[in-house]
Image (spheres, helix red, strand yellow):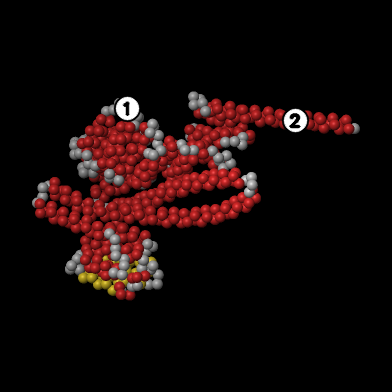
């Protein structure tokens, strides 16, 4: 009986050992096959579909056997092949899989590559700039963790290009400045691309001298002849914008004669179109075929954005000789711009149509609506990109801080583990508890600060835009008039008079942005300022001022009130021809109410009332949570009601 029992136990042990050996052999075989398929799939000489089949085999085997980061590498290769084969639904599906798996197998290098791939997909294929910007930003963070400067720079360069495409030119300049610190100086084309983008940013901001300098740097640095011709074309466009048509036509002729350009390429069409436009602007004789040829080339390669430019230039070409034909081309621009979501092109076309048909109110109203929409969109985009970058910086700082804290904690634990284990355990628990509390508190403070900063950034952008517009309208127009007087060799007395006006305008502008006395003399300073600004023949009546608790108002409220009333009086002095101005002040429980009225010429709101002149005033009030409303009719005076929070 004992012998039989021992024999059974022996046979059972042999059987289990054999099964274990078979299992280990099978697992080893699976791993070897997985690695074999994966290595073969990397062969760039194989067709993409063959590489995909090999990767899919490796993925199927790794999915059931691997608990290692090799699985992430296979999954990234699979995603890259989905992208290369145009299988975008599968790309999005397995991007989510990789994101989920990465929480288990952390691999910063693979995650950096995957997020760069998805950023490129959202930018070039899906045309979703916000998503592309976020994925490039994540990719940059992962490459920062592995200290890969070159890829950090590439991500920043792509982020800057997205900002530029969304009209965030200042933000793009800032991102490019950071990118140049990381880009590999040996990769001259990347650095040249950064300089070229900087040049375009300065061109869009009307800094033509700086734009030319950056384009010349890019031209000298790039090793690609195709890129060099493209940058030269951008430089020629800068000359056109700056009114240097002779320089533009000379450079464009040189580009057009270069044999590197393909005759049917969109780049060649752009050169020809710019050349025709520059020639026409320089008042030289030119035939319509010079504009039609690049248009036909763009139609052949389906370059819709290029077609917008051609139709716009053709409309401008016919605007003086055949207005109806010009209108047809501009209508085509409007329809095409709506189809491809390019509202800036529609705005340009409407600008031309307003000059052709000044009496068409519908065109004016559409232009005003579109201009306001674009302005709001640009502000929104700038704020979004600023927030994305800020969140990314906070995350990176948190990672570095956590790594440092972990290293210090581990070193301390190693020193104390042998002789103070239990004491250290309790002490460590207490420190972690306090640390979590402090970290939670700091994160809350940072979120509040981030929100506040975003609000202030949006208001700052609006204020900058309004200041720039006012400086352009008031001072720029006078300066242009003075230049015309000098060019026409006008009488010196007229020139001196115009200079005196410009000097007075600059003094008024300087006073407007200078500090305001918010102390005990604020009321007197306010009344004195209003009395000085109004014309001598205008009578001023102020009521309710004695009942206001001036000392209870904050400095921000006083400064805002001071500057808003100043802007209303400046507007009145320039345009209203009023003989009487009345201001009524009333302090209520929650707000301070100021009612302004004059008996001037007013404004006919039925003919398209534009508040752009008082946009700065509105932004000031909105920045402190207040409101301002306007009421006006032709020859019936002008009224405004201002409400400011009572704090």
In this picture, is 411 found above or below 527?
above
Q: Quadrant of residue 518?
A: bottom left
Q: Earlier in the sequence, mark 1 or mark 2?
A: 2
Where is the N terminus found, in terms of image quarters? top right
In this picture, is 596 found above or below 121?
below
Foreground pick, 409 / 503: 409
Secondary structure at badge 2 equals: helix
Task: Check the image and name the residue furthest to the front.
Answer: 419
Residue at 25 percent across and 64 percent down: it is 569
Left or right of 66 in this view: 526: left
Local crowd size for mark 1, using a 10 Å CA cut-off: few (<14), some (14–19), many (≥20): few
The residue that mark 1 highlights is 260
Foreground pick, 415 / 351: 415
Where is the C terminus found, in terms of image quarters? bottom left
Label drawn at residue 51: none
Secondary structure at badge 1 equals: loop
The residue that mark 2 highlights is 17
Residue at 21 percent across and 66 percent down: it is 532
Local crowd size for mark 2, using a 10 Å CA cut-off: few (<14), some (14–19), many (≥20): few
Left or right of 638 in this view: 381: right
* x and y percentages locating residue 226 in the rendered image: 34, 30
* x and y percentages locating residue 104 in the rendered image: 58, 41
Residue at 57 percent across and 32 percent down: it is 56
* x and y percentages locating residue 339 in the rendered image: 38, 44
């Amino acid at each position: 009986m004992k012998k039989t029992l021992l024999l059974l136990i022996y046979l059972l042990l042999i059987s289990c050992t054999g099964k274990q050996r078979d299992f280990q052999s099978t697992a080893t075989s699976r791993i070897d096959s997985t690695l074999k398929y994966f290595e073969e799939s990397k062969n760039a000489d194989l067709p993409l579909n063959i590489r995909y089949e090999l990767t899919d085999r490796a993925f199927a085997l790794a999915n059931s056997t691997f608990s290692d980061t090799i699985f992430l590498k296979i999954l990234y290769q699979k995603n890259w092949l989905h992208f290369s084969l145009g299988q975008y639904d599968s790309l999005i599906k397995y991007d989510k899989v990789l994101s989920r798996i990465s929480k288990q197998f952390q691999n910063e290098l693979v995650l950096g590559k995957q997020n760069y791939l998805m950023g490129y997909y959202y930018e070039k294929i899906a045309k979703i700039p916000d998503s592309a910007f976020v994925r490039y930003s994540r990719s940059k963070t992962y490459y920062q963790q592995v200290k890969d400067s070159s890829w950090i720079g590439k991500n920043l360069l792509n982020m800057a290009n997205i900002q530029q495409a969304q009209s965030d030119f200042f933000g793009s300049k800032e991102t490019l400045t950071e990118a140049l610190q990381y880009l590999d100086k040996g990769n001259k084309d990347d650095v040249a691309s950064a300089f070229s983008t900087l040049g375009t940013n300065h061109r869009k901001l009307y800094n033509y001298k700086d734009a030319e300098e950056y384009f010349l740097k890019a031209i000298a640095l790039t090793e690609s002849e195709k890129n060099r011709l493209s940058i030269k074309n951008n430089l020629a466009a800068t000359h056109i914008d700056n009114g240097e048509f002779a320089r533009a036509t000379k450079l464009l002729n040189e580009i057009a004669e270069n044999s590197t350009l393909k005759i049917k390429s969109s780049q060649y069409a752009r050169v020809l179109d710019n050349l025709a436009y520059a020639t026409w602007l320089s008042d030289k004789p030119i035939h319509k075929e010079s504009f039609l040829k690049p248009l036909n080339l763009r139609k052949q390669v389906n370059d819709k954005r290029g077609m917008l430019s051609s139709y716009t230039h053709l409309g401008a070409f016919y605007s003086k000789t055949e207005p109806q034909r010009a209108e047809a081309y501009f209508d085509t621009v409007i329809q095409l711009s709506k189809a491809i979501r390019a509202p800036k092109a529609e705005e340009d076309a409407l600008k031309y149509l307003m000059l052709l048909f000044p009496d068409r109110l519908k065109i004016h109203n559409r232009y005003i609506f579109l201009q306001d929409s674009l302005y709001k969109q640009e502000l929104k985009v700038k704020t979004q990109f600023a927030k994305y970058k800020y969140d990314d910086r906070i995350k990176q700082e948190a990672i570095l801080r956590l790594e440092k804290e972990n290293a210090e904690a581990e070193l301390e634990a190693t020193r104390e583990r042998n002789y103070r284990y239990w004491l250290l355990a309790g002490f460590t628990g207490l420190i972690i508890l306090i640390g979590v509390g402090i970290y939670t508190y700091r994160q809350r403070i940072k979120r509040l600060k981030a929100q506040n900063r975003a609000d202030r950034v949006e208001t700052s952008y609006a204020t900058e835009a309004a200041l720039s517009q006012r400086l352009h309208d008031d001072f720029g127009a006078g300066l242009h008039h003075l230049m015309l007087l000098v060019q026409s060799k006008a009488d010196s007395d007229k020139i001196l008079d115009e200079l005196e006006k410009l000097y007075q305008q600059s003094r008024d502008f300087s006073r407007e942005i200078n500090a305001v006395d918010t102390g005990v003399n604020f009321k007197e300073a306010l009344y004195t300022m209003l009395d000085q600004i109004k014309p001598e023949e205008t009578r001023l009546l102020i009521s309710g001022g004695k009942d206001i608790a001036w000392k209870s108002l904050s400095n921000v409220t006083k400064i805002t009130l001071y500057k808003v009333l100043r802007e209303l009086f400046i507007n009145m002095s320039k345009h209203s021809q009023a003989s009487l101005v009345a201001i009524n002040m009333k302090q209520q429980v929650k707000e301070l109410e100021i009612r302004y009225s004059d008996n001037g010429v007013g404004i006919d709101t039925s003919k398209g009332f534009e508040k752009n002149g008082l946009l700065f005033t509105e932004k000031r009030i909105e920045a402190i949570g207040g409101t301002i409303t306007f009421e006006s009719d032709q020859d019936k005076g002008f009224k405004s009601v201002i409400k400011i929070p009572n704090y």
